[in-house]
Image: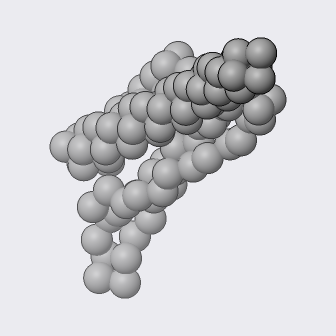
Amino acid sequence: MKGAIETMMGVVIIALSTVLITGFIIASLNTQKAQNYHAAVVAEVEASDFSPTVIASCEEKAIENGYTDLQIEQMTSVKEEKYAKVTLMYDYPMPLLNVLLEHKIVGYAR
């Protein structure tokens, strides 16, 4: 009888661990997707030479794609060169732990 209880406890622990690890893997995949989207936005802004219509379009697409916010701040360097700070905010959910964090990725388009 003792062996059956120990085996059942082991199975329950393995099942819970599997569900928890699956949640972390899904969150990691969401982060990777956000990083890829951020890189695509930076490349698109650079290719358009900081066009206001492209910037507005990217900001709208980010909301449509389920990201919390996309901010593109245009700036000028000391050498009068244009660049933009691109900040993508996205949710980082872990449903099993009932946790919802907001992460952000910051990069620069030059």
x then y, percent, for residue 79: 29, 82
Q: Tell me if 81 is positioned left or right of 59 in this view.
A: left
Instruction: Judge by depth and name the residue closer to the eye, 35 or 28.
Output: 28
Q: Residue furthest bottom?
A: 78
Picture residue at 33% right of the left edge, 38% below the top: 36
Q: Residue furthest left?
A: 47
Instruction: Judge by depth and name the residue closer to the eye, 54 or 92.
Output: 92
Q: Is the N terminus in the top left, top right, bottom left or bottom right quadrant? A: top right
Tag count: 0
Is residue 53 at all visible to an observer of this figure?
Answer: yes
Picture residue at 77% right of the left edge, 23% below the top: 2
Picture residue at 32% right of the left edge, 64% below the top: 82
Instruction: Judge by depth and name the residue closer to the eye, 46 or 15.
Output: 15
Is residue 74 at all visible to an observer of this figure?
Answer: no
Picture residue at 37% right of the left edge, 60% below the top: 108
On screen, 98 above or below 50? above
State the scheme by which the image is colored.
Answer: one colour
Instruction: Judge by depth and name the residue closer to the eye, 90 or 72.
Output: 90
Q: Is the C terminus in the top left, top right, bottom left or bottom right quadrant? A: bottom left
On screen, 3 above or below 73? above
x then y, percent, for residue 97: 76, 32
x then y, percent, for residue 4: 70, 16
| Residue 98 in which image quadrant | top right
Q: Tell me if 105 is positioned left or right of 37 in this view.
A: right
Q: Residue furthest front?
A: 1
On screen, 76 above or below 28? below
x then y, percent, for residue 71: 55, 45
